């Protein structure tokens, strides 16, 4: 069985966002694998360790910089990488088309990806890939069982936990709580340097969504800050909640 | 091309509030407003949508629509779009809503703006504000395909009742059992009687300062007095005091309640991203230098183990 994992390179979640010439500046920003995708990589490697998958292929669409994300995934334990060179301004439609074109040629049994990217927060690409490839999909998974040509997925749904079964091949997107991604070992990092990575150009696909402008949210101002005995501060906080916020007490 | 469609979010006849928020918003756009409801025995819900201005209610009933499944819902909606040609379609930005919208958008080879917090749609031109980097920045985007598709975050559009005709329309059923490719084996509702984080008016969250389950219990006590949702920072999730579904922040949920109370949370940038858009913010923290004070309308420097019990007894009075 072949597992293919889509990874996106994103800003570190600790990054402070600043604008330059009306665009988000990447100056001095540490780039990482999108945390949701990192969990998908770990999930793929675990399928291999369990003997369910034979090969784990990592695919990323983006600039040359995304090679670092691929190398990190290889250092974790993936077998092979593919970089799809694409303008970083590609929207979710264009991104899904580029990835799907490569996935089609690879014919994997399972496509894994994070359910959302920590940068654009769109949560569209895995589902779009499934539609292009005519595969079933399940999103936001926290557990996965693979047997008998089927995947049984546990998802973090609204108001509860959903268990969904789909036939393979399928696209499955992860929640961050699925697993705890491993740190690449020194041995893994050395081995990753020798693992094959191919580079392909993205097909020319036009965006369907145009970015008009980017802005920073209005900064929240600090208000009242009090320090005293708990009997005093607790009473003042309760009073503020009742009279300023006007909360209802059940 | 005419009309704005709002996809109803309901489960077992219970309608999510975000549905009414979307109808209220759609009304502002001046076009005909329709609610689209999928399910079994859902026609009786039509008057509920009329109260928020729905001129029409498209009722899609059948066994295969009883519970959400992507295949049948997308096949049906795509056929309806083809027949009725709406200008714009709004979905709730929920587990099911974003799944539905994303797969439909790709089937139509269309653009989609997800997790929208502000919208402006006229004559098939849709410009939307989305929060990106979990709220650290805002992007204004234009969906350049028609119908204009968007998923809307709960709690950001203002509710406004207005009478609509609510005329029931029963579209031809275009989906069949062959379109269903996901089998839902089980759904285990969360045991909590508390509201969901993303829909609650008040959210009370606990962080590292809770020190363990005892501290979390105090936070829960305060939450329950306010009918609030319970949340946590990454520290309390990683320590196993709370489940991941309760994490507020960049790799958890983004919330925007009327009141957010941060207990023992220092305010790491990832956490602030998830809650800074709350209308009112209060915090209780022992560290007077904690960044959470910079975004709090009311900050208490103190020990949550001492302060929360006082707050609870004062609220009881």
Image (cartoon, rainbow, N blue to C red):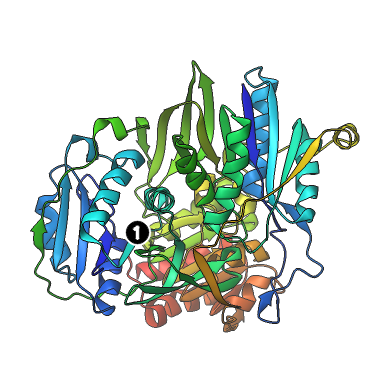
Badge 1: how crowded within 10 Å, few (<14), some, or many (20+)? many
Say if A109 sits above or below A24 in the image: above
| Direction from residue B169 to residue A126 in the image, left or right | right
The one of A8 and B238 positioned closer to us in this rendering: A8
Horizontal and vertical percent position of residue A53:
64, 22
What is the quadrant of the C terminus of chain A in the image? bottom left
| Direction from residue A206 to residue B224 in the image, left or right | left
Horizontal and vertical percent position of residue A221:
59, 84
Which residue was labeled with disc 1?
B91
Q: Secondary structure at mark 1?
A: strand
Q: Residue at x 56, y 68 (%)?
A: B135
- Residue A142 at least partly seen: yes
Horizontal and vertical percent position of residue A97:
55, 49
Say if A154 sits above or below A7 in the image: above
> Splitting the image into 4 quarters, where does residue B229 fall?
bottom left
- Residue A250 at least partly seen: no
Q: Residue at x 60, y 59 (%)?
A: B250
């Amino acid at each position: 069985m072949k597992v293919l994992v889509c990874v996106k390179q994103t800003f570190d979640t600790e990054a402070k966002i600043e604008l330059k010439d009306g665009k988000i500046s990447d100056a001095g920003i540490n780039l990482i694998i999108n945390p949701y995708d990192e969990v998908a990589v770990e999930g793929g490697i675990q399928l291999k360790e369990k003997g369910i998958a034979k090969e784990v292929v990592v695919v990323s669409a983006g600039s040359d910089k995304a090679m670092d994300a691929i190398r990190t995934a290889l250092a974790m334990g993936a077998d092979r990488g593919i970089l799809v060179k694409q303008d970083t301004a590609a929207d979710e439609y264009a991104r899904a088309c580029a990835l799907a074109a490569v996935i089609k040629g690879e014919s994997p049994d399972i496509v894994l990806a994070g359910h959302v990217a920590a940068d654009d927060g769109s949560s569209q690409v895995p589902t779009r890939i499934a539609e292009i490839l005519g595969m079933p999909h399940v999103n936001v998974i926290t557990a996965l069982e693979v047997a008998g040509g089927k995947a049984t997925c546990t998802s973090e749904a609204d108001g509860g936990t959903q268990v969904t079964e789909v036939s393979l091949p399928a696209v499955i997107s992860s929640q961050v709580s699925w697993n705890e991604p491993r740190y690449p070992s020194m041995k893994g990092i050395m081995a990753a340097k020798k693992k094959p990575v191919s580079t392909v150009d993205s097909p020319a696909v036009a965006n369907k969504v145009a970015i008009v402008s980017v802005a920073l949210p209005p900064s929240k101002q600090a208000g009242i800050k009090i320090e005293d005995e708990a009997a005093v501060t607790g009473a003042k906080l309760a009073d503020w909640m009742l009279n300023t916020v006007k909360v209802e007490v059940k | 091309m005419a009309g704005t469609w709002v996809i109803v979010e309901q489960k077992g006849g219970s309608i999510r509030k975000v549905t009414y928020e979307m109808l209220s918003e759609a009304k502002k756009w001046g076009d005909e407003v329709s609610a689209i409801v999928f399910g079994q025995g859902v026609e009786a819900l039509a008057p509920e949508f009329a109260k928020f201005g729905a001129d029409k209610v498209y009722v899609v009933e059948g066994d295969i629509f009883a519970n959400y499944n992507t295949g049948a819902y997308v096949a049906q909606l795509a056929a309806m779009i083809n027949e009725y040609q709406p200008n714009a379609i709004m979905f709730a930005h929920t587990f099911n809503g974003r799944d539905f919208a994303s797969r439909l958008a790709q089937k139509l080879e269309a653009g989609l703006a997800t997790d929208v917090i502000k919208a402006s749609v006229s004559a098939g031109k849709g410009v939307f504000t989305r929060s990106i980097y979990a709220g650290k920045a805002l992007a204004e985007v234009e969906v350049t395909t028609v119908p204009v598709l968007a998923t809307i975050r709960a709690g950001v559009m203002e509710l406004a009742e207005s009478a609509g005709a609510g005329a029931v329309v029963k579209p031809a059923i275009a989906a069949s059992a062959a379109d269903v490719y996901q089998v839902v084996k089980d759904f285990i509702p969360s045991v909590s009687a508390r509201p969901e984080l993303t829909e609650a008016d008040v959210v009370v969250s606990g962080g590292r300062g809770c020190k363990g389950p005892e501290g979390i219990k105090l936070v829960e006590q305060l939450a329950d007095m306010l009918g609030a949702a319970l949340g946590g920072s990454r520290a309390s999730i990683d320590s196993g005091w709370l489940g991941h579904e309760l994490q507020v922040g960049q790799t958890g949920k983004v919330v925007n309640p009327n009141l957010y109370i941060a207990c023992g949370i220092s305010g790491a940038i990832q956490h602030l991203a998830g809650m800074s858009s709350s209308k009112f913010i209060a915090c209780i923290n022992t560290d007077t230098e904690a960044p959470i004070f910079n975004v709090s309308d009311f900050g208490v420097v103190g020990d949550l183990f001492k302060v929360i019990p006082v707050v609870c007894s004062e609220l009881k009075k």
